[in-house]
Amino acid sequence: MLTEKKLAPARSMSLAQLASRFRELGIAAFILVLAALVSLRAPAFLSVDNFRDILLNISILVIVALGQMMVIITRGIDLSVSSMIGLTAMMVSSMLVLFPWLPMPAAILLGLALGATLGAFNGLIIAVGNVPPIIATLGTMSIYRGMVFFYSQGSWVNASDMPEGFRRLAKASPFGVPNLILFAVAVLLLVAFFLRLTRAGRDIYAVGSNPDAARFAGIRAQRVIFTVYVLSGLLAGLAGVLWASRFEAAQTNTAFGFELQTVAAPVVGGVNIFGGSGGVIGVVLGAFLLGVIENSLTLVKISPFWQLAAQGLLILLAVVFDAAVLRRMQKRGS
Amino acid sequence: MAKRFLRWEWLLVALIVVMSVVNTRLSPFFLEPTNLLRASSDFMEIGIMMLPMVFIIITGNIDLSVASTLGLSASLLGYLHNAGWNIWLAAAMALLAGALCGLLNGALIARLGLPSLVVTLGTFSFYRGLAYALLGDQAARGYPEAFTLIGQGRLPGTRVPYALLLFIVLAVIFTLVLRGTRFGRYLYAIGNNEAASRYSGVPVRRIKLMIYTLSGLMSALAGMVLAARFGSTRPDIGSGLELTVITITVLGGVSIAGGVGTMVGASLSLLLIGITRFGMGLMNLQGQVQGIAIGALLILSILLPQVGGWLAKRHVWGRATLLPVGAALLVAVAFGWFFFWSRGLMLAAQ
């Protein structure tokens, strides 16, 4: 009986899995072609330093995009991540200005706690209040951003006010690799473990692929949905601390507009916007592709003003590509 | 259902009255027609974009790219003006570009069956990116006076701004189309059940294509009004306005799930937000802090209608709910205390 129950979803998953494998290979190939073309024009592209630059640039994106991915798997969206980053960056840096003796782990914990609280508010409105995720997070995006302005009355926390230890948090590399990259790798491993090997992680996929069936199977969908928004907030909180440390400043407009990239990375990386499928590898590849494009536009000396357009075009290409693959597969299947 | 939303519109009217009374007490200048009419011009671009947004949300879709389309067409206007084009020819091209932006959205959504949220999120950044690519970090200025009159001028002999007149004319047309034509009824049908309306012969694809093209055109028109009002264009013109447009539409009783909503409700909501913002301006609140109130209104407009339903359920008051509610309150109080405590310290230190 049990095996029968497991077989049915497994067969339907394989189509989606095949699509995402296909997608991941496609992006990897695209990155290689792009890298080859760019390195012809700018040989500096292939240097170790440049590679490290790209990784540094996408580390924060990967952290937040992983949270966004879990939200998207449950058929939701979290547009408030950028404002949560801005608010935690501002509050944690202010704390460190007031109490420079605070140890770094405490600063990180504070960021996690603040982010999780803001995320829990989103989760409450969405899971308990039945407000559609896009409306709820569009609302909290502007509420949290307003709170940043209210908190600081428009002023910034500058590098000169920050304790030395905090400025070094993201950039120091005691293990040979900058801490920022290590943070991203650690989050990546934790999220991969959580999604693949824990029951709560599997429940996220179940709720996303069929909420009604998940409910009948005894999964508390409401609780799962609440959890993903808390996790998204938690990761945004961590990102806020790292953002302030990396750029040595907390501004009222920190991370403004960043939510778009956090949605772009998973969507480009094959996380289905209709929920139920997607994985951490796709998110990393998606973020890496965005990073490579940004980096190569600079190296090939194309105006940085084209970057936003390129990013939007990439999202469109990704969804058009998805639709085409899906249609072909459905034709072959029937 | 019709009854329910009739009540919703009365609620909006009541809120408008309350806000007006509050504003009058805040400032004796509030009720002066000159002030009110001048303040109205801040909202006409938003109103113009709101009209097709009502159509789109009624069909159960969304358009996040309106403000970016506005930015692209206004930037194209500035670019062509800088290149020495005649302003009216440039404006015509900008309107055409806006319509094409909408057509592309519509084609991707209607022809390929892609979700409108993702498509317009993509074009949101694509169109804004093109605006930056056109103008870079410079601004276009020096539009002829005949053009800036669209945004700054008033009807001769009165204090009514041209932009307000334009909005009212458009609003009447959109209301008539929604209420009195087959096209309008099709919009509700699609929002209620897209598959069923397709099987009963509603040209769903063509209608989606039309409303998105219309949305692009109206966004471009809003871009012309805004550029004329500012007398200049920067590539970030109007960025973030999509949030306000969607907030006003949803607050106006247009359900994000589709199938429900009226143009009257949306227009009342526009008036309500306008008056609220104006009042907060009188209180010298910064624009970004006003965002707290707008965001809260958006969420409350969907939460509040449900509260009655929750309270009616007896089991809400059991132990199983009291515990999480208590925990949530505790976290909220702790967060609020920390927020104000650290803010106080920070402001004292400066």
Image (spheres, coloured by chain):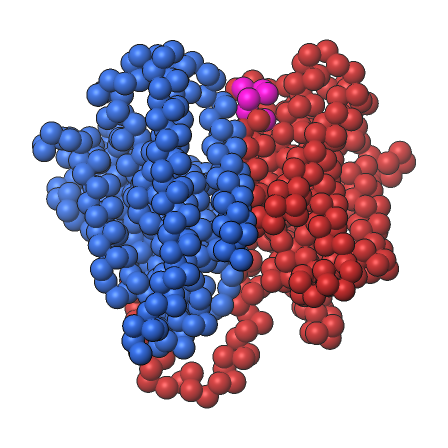
Chain colours: A blue, B red
Q: Main secondary structure of the magenta part?
A: helix
Which region shows up in magenta? Answer: B131-136
The stretch drawn in magenta includes residue A74: no
* Relative to A281, B90 lies left or right: right
Compare residues A278 and B95 and report the one nearer the observer. Answer: A278
* Relative to B248, B292 lies left or right: left
Image-quadrant location for residue B200: bottom right
Q: Position of residue A262 (x, y in %)?
A: 40, 42
Residue A329 higher or lower than A133, as above or below: above
Q: Position of residue B22 (x, y in %)?
A: 63, 59
Compare residues A186 and A152 and report the one nearer the observer. Answer: A186
Residue sitting at x 32%, y 40%: A284
Q: Position of residue A81 (x, y in %)?
A: 39, 47
Residue sitting at x 68%, y 52%: B56
Kindly tell me whether residue A256 is visible in this rendering: yes
* Relative to B223, B307 lies left or right: left
Q: Residue furthest right?
A: B157
How many labels, in total?
0
Q: Residue furthest bottom?
A: B314
Residue sitting at x 55%, y 52%: A331
Q: Residue furthest left?
A: A174
* Relative to B164, B270 lies left or right: left
Image-quadrant location for residue A301: top left
